[in-house]
Amino acid sequence: MKHLFLTFVFAVGFAVSMFAQQFGMSAEIRPRYETKHGYKSLLATNADGSNFISQRTRLNFDFKNEKLKIRLSMQNVRVWGDVSTLSANDNANSLHEAWAEVNLNSKLSLKLGRQEIVYDDHRIFGNVGWAQQARSHDAFIFKYLPNKNNRLDVGFALNSDSQAGVDNLYSNVAGYKTFQYAWYHGKFNQLGLSFLLLNTGIEYLDTASDQKVDYFQTIGPRFTYKKDKLNANAALYFQTGKVTDIKVNAMYYAANLGYKVSDVFKIGVGYEYLSGKDMDDTNADINTFAPLFGTNHKFNGWMDYFYVGFGNATGLQDINATFAYNKNKFSAKLIPHLFSAAANVYNGSDKMDANLGTEIDFTLGYKIAKDIKLNAGYSKMMGTDTMEVIKGGDKDENSSWAWIMFTFKPNLFKHTVK
């Protein structure tokens, strides 16, 4: 496999040097130390936290000419020490991206293969860049850009476990059997409008042990506004349809307001609502909004108590603020969150207060050189009795998380033939 890959790389490099307009090679090495002490859930009484170093390593190959773009991204994700120092094998390798995009004309293009899909603020489609492995899809995307202010993407995906000659039940390892979507984005002076229509199919065995695919839809707009020092955005999404023969009826809405106080200091406030289901509700309908393929680490606190891996059946309300400083090579950000359940929570027969607790996230960044960044952060969760009911653990234990990360992203090679 290694020899085949090297042969392919040299062959592509030779062909590109002879005929292509542009060929590039870049890399990323991103080691990150973390100390987790109540991450994702409140720490259990007298439990110890963990300490480890993980690392993302990528090698990217890019090719571009007038008609064609190709990207290959080889990835290795590991925890330091998970492979023996004498190991001859490494199962941590993967192909993060492998796609080709062809320009049919100045307005139309087709993109096929393993690729990141990112739209708007990453809430429904995101690349989950914080996670060392990140997210990519096997998909086909049709892109239409009639002018610089309007864009329409239409995407398709169909997943299977093998090339078997019979229709085997898909394991849903990708999280879905199939999806189809249309995403529109337009710019109108200071206003921006996006609209998403996403149809997601989940395969399962019904009561008669027959294979079946149920579809549920995510539909809604997102608005942005920016003028002078002020910026704002708002979004509203509905989910309907069926999953494993259960009706879906859920919703999401959010609004954020930001203001640039000076050239180096910004502030913002925001509110987000994701519907949930009352704990005493015996109706089988799914009322919990699923953010699907979004970069969930970006939202609702960096300690990932909510929606990373989904869950959170009672939904969520998140009131937050942002204080950001950025000057020269240095940056800092402070984000407090006030969390509460969006549906009723019960401890036995006792109805709990909706307040789940407060999380404070703090991060620092420094650009050491053009291709080298240093980032660090500290977060603390101050949970409540209601958080204990939902997430488990002990609210009186110190639930905190700290990390430090180096990111090296050099461009190794770039060759252009005119």
Image (cartoon, grey):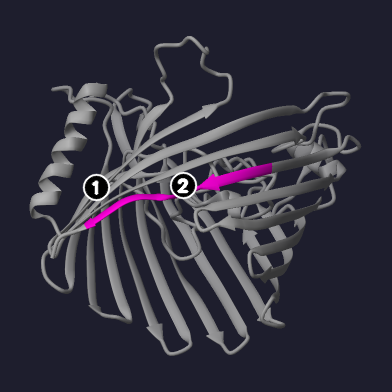
> Which mark, by number, is residue 247?
2
Q: Identify which residue is drawn at 45% across, 44% down.
A: 28
Q: Residue furthest right?
A: 396
**Front-lying residue, 45 or 218:** 45
Q: Identify which residue is drawn at 31% across, 29% down.
A: 170
Q: Quadrant of the N terminus?
A: top left
Span of residues in magenta: 404-415
Q: Is residue 146 magenta?
A: no
**Front-lying residue, 306 or 109:** 109
Q: Earlier in the sequence, mark 2 or mark 1?
A: 1
Image vertical order of residue 273 relative to residue 161, above or below: below
Q: Is residue 412 magenta?
A: yes
What amino acid is at disc 2?
Lys
Residue occupied by mark 1: 99
Q: Secondary structure at mark 2?
A: strand
User: Mark 2 and mark 1: span between their CA atoms?
Assistant: 35 Å
136 to the left or right of 123: left
Image vertical order of residue 153 relative to residue 292, above or below: below
